[in-house]
Amino acid sequence: MNHFVANSNHKRVQRRLFANRVAQSIFFVATLFCLLVLSVLFYRVITQSWGWLDFQFLISKLSTNPQKAGIAGPLLGTFWLMLVVAPVAFVLGVGTAIYLEEYAKRGRLHSLIQTNIANLAGVPSIVFGLLGLTLFVRAADLGNVVLAGGLTLALLVLPIVVVASQEALRAVPQELREASYAMGATKWQTIRHVVLPAALPGILTGVILALSRAVGETAPLVVIGIPALLIPLPTGLLDKFTALPLQIYYWTIDSALVAEYAHLAACTIVILLLVMLAMNSAAILIRNRFQQRF
């Protein structure tokens, strides 16, 4: 009897080990496939941009001549966009998270709001483009300017900022709040001097990663009618503009007629990847610095 039980247990263990090896092999093959696809994409972009990407490309304006075209306009337009998106998304997103986590009463309404915020994070970006077109371009009569594009992208990343900020606030130990109340601090004083400093690394990380998504968005800008014309460089929030992902889109389309535009699109992709890499690196550095501080 004991021999039968031991043999049964041994077979069960062998089946589990075999299933574990199969799962490990599947995950390994999936990882290799993803790395292969990324390697092909990077190789394609680097080879097409080789010999075209230089400092002159960064400071030159858009041109119908591929040899003279540059991304000074799209680069500056992207910078102005982030000047709108960053403060709007940070203030509204963090403020909403603080209210939902620290002030709002738990109940059906709270659960409904939470569910809708989570669902908004998965809404296609083109829907936010339609919302921006209706609210900012037409209803507010702003036109396709920097401010309209920035507010549209801020709405796009707002759910991401709210969710990330809520998770950071929940990670703060409740004991810190109780200790602050025991010292006679008010609700707002506790949030300002105890909760926010402790949650700041997670909040900033979420905000910067949300901005990284906004930098690479194309569909909302296409919907609100951002042109890819030879327009002057934007100098304010009410100027017309173009952006890096939008220029990649139009140059990729134009490459069917003029092959040189494919090289310009590849160069712009490299610059956009470097911008996103810099933003993600900044998120990691800021998080590590504040974690050491608090």
Image (cartoon, rainbow, N blue to C red):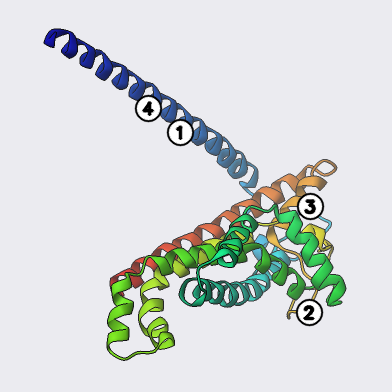
Residue at 81% across, 71% down: 135
Which numbered disc, 1 or 4, marks the residue that appears first in the sequence?
4
| Secondary structure of the residue carrying numbered label 3 | helix
> Residues under labels 1 and 2: Cα distance?
45 Å
What residue is shown with label 2?
238
Of tags 3 and 1, the one toward the viewer is: 1
Which numbered disc, 3 or 1, marks the residue that appears first in the sequence?
1
What residue type is disc 4 on?
A: Gln
Label 2, residues with CA under 10 Å away: few <14, some 14-19, many ≥20: some
Label 4, residues with CA under 10 Å away: few <14, some 14-19, many ≥20: few
Q: Which of 169 and 139 is in front in this view?
A: 169
Label 3, residues with CA under 10 Å away: few <14, some 14-19, many ≥20: some
| Secondary structure of the residue carrying numbered label 2 | loop
What residue type is disc 2 on?
A: Leu
Label 1, residues with CA under 10 Å away: few <14, some 14-19, many ≥20: few
| Residue 102, image x, y percentages | 46, 75
Which numbered disc, 1 or 2, marks the residue that appears first in the sequence?
1
What residue is shown with label 4?
24
